[in-house]
Amino acid sequence: MRIDFISDIACPWCALGVASLEKALQQLGDDFKYELHFQPFELNPDMPKEGKNLIDYLSSKYGMSAERIAASHEMLRERGLEVGFAFGHREQIWNTFDAHRLLYWADQLGQTNQFALKKALLRAYHGEGRIPHDLVFLVGQGLDRGDSD
């Protein structure tokens, strides 16, 4: 079975989706054969490299109050714990184009590499508040480490 997962690492719901999908695939076991491919979808293609303040951006884009944003993030953290994904504190939202380019190349190397990279990028962005277009950061995600979690 081919699974195409269309997402952006900037999307917290996508982080939950990847963690949930991974749990489901583990439950299905090794007898379930699949090919997993992550396809790019930029939520914010016009986001400048320097990014924007997260609360200001969400308030402007969705009309959300700071309190509603905080409640939403708390709900995401709780749901993340249920599926094994740890959300950290992040004050900025950034452009993810370079991360999408790296994920494309990882797909060319094979689905295991791309899956490991996608999870690493999601952890770094949502868990650690890392900048996804920083070249030192992107190179540090190293496809050759054999990191699969």
Image (cartoon, helix red, strand yellow):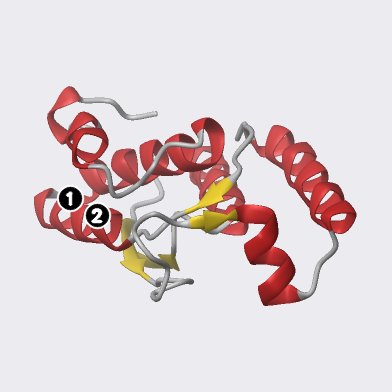
Residue 123 screen position, x and y as percent: 47, 36
Q: Left or right: where does residue 60 sit relative to residue 64?
A: left
Residues at marks 1 and 2, CA–CA distance in whole angstroms: 5 Å
Q: Check disc 1 and give the amino acid type.
A: Ala
Binning the other alpha carbons within 10 Å of mark 2 as few (below 14), some (14 to 19) or many (20 upward) gives: many
Helix, strand or loop for disc 1 = helix
Q: Left or right: where does residue 81 sit relative to residue 57?
A: right
Contact flag, marks 1 and 2 (Cβ < 8 Å): yes
Residue 141 screen position, x and y as percent: 25, 33
Helix, strand or loop for disc 2 = helix
Identify which residue is drawn at 33% across, 57% down.
Answer: 36
Q: Quadrant of the N terminus?
A: bottom left
Where is residue 91, by image quadrant?
top right
**Residue 109 at least partly seen:** yes
Where is residue 81, by image quadrant?
top right
Q: Left or right: where does residue 86 sit relative to residue 114?
A: right
**Residue 1 at least partly seen:** no
Residue annotated with mark 1: 106
Residue annotated with mark 2: 103
Identify which residue is drawn at 26% across, 48% down.
Answer: 114
